[in-house]
Image (cartoon, helix red, strand yellow):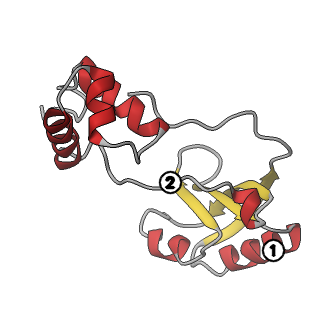
Amino acid sequence: MAPTRTEHLDDTDRALLLLLQQDAGQPYAALGKAVGLSTAAAHERVRKLRERGVIRRTTVEVDPKALGLGVLSFVMVDSSAWMGDSAKAFAAIPEIEEAHVIAGSASVLVKVRTATTEQLQDVLRRLYAIQGVNGTQATVVLETFFERPPAP
């Protein structure tokens, strides 16, 4: 059996991941000090976490509302065919932040952010243009209690 990405994470790796999730722009000196490593050792640990694919990318978290994207919705997409080969079609719709092939009453679940419900309606129209899509069910989020990254 192939080893999992987290199989060889020790407490120091987990602590570094937690610190980086809180602020990915921290200097290696601060990271090292927080976990009891030298600057060079902290840098090397983070480099290895990147190489192993544990850290996929470093990014900035932007508040969607500050960009005028106040409408968050989740859309269940029904289909008449297997949708597992349709990733590019879903990715071509920029308002879709995530797309997941799922088991259950629908085939795909997408997370959509728009400025207005009219723009959401336009996204739904574009979803119907994807080959195999024969229905959607949108749920608009009224309030988000919290969002969090996976715990290391």
**What residue is drawn where x is 44% and y is 38%?**
21
Relative to 63, residue 86 above or below: below
**In front: label 1 or label 2:** 1
State the image quarter where residue 136 is shown.
bottom right
Q: Nearer the viewer, residue 22 or 90?
A: 22
Image quarter of the C terminus: top left
**What residue is drawn where x is 33% and y is 33%?**
30
- Side of 3 where 70 appears, left or right: right
Residue type beneath disc 2: Val
Give me the disc on residue 101: 2
The spot of residue 24 in percent (x, y) is 41, 45
Q: Dot 2 lies on which element? A: strand
- Side of 5 where 142 appears, left or right: right
**What residue is drawn where x is 55% and y is 71%?**
90
Mark 1 residue crowding within 10 angstroms, few (<14) / some (14–19) / many (20+): some
State the image quarter where residue 126 is shown.
bottom right
Q: Name the residue under label 1.
A: 119
Image quarter of the N terminus: top left
The spot of residue 14 in percent (x, y) is 31, 25
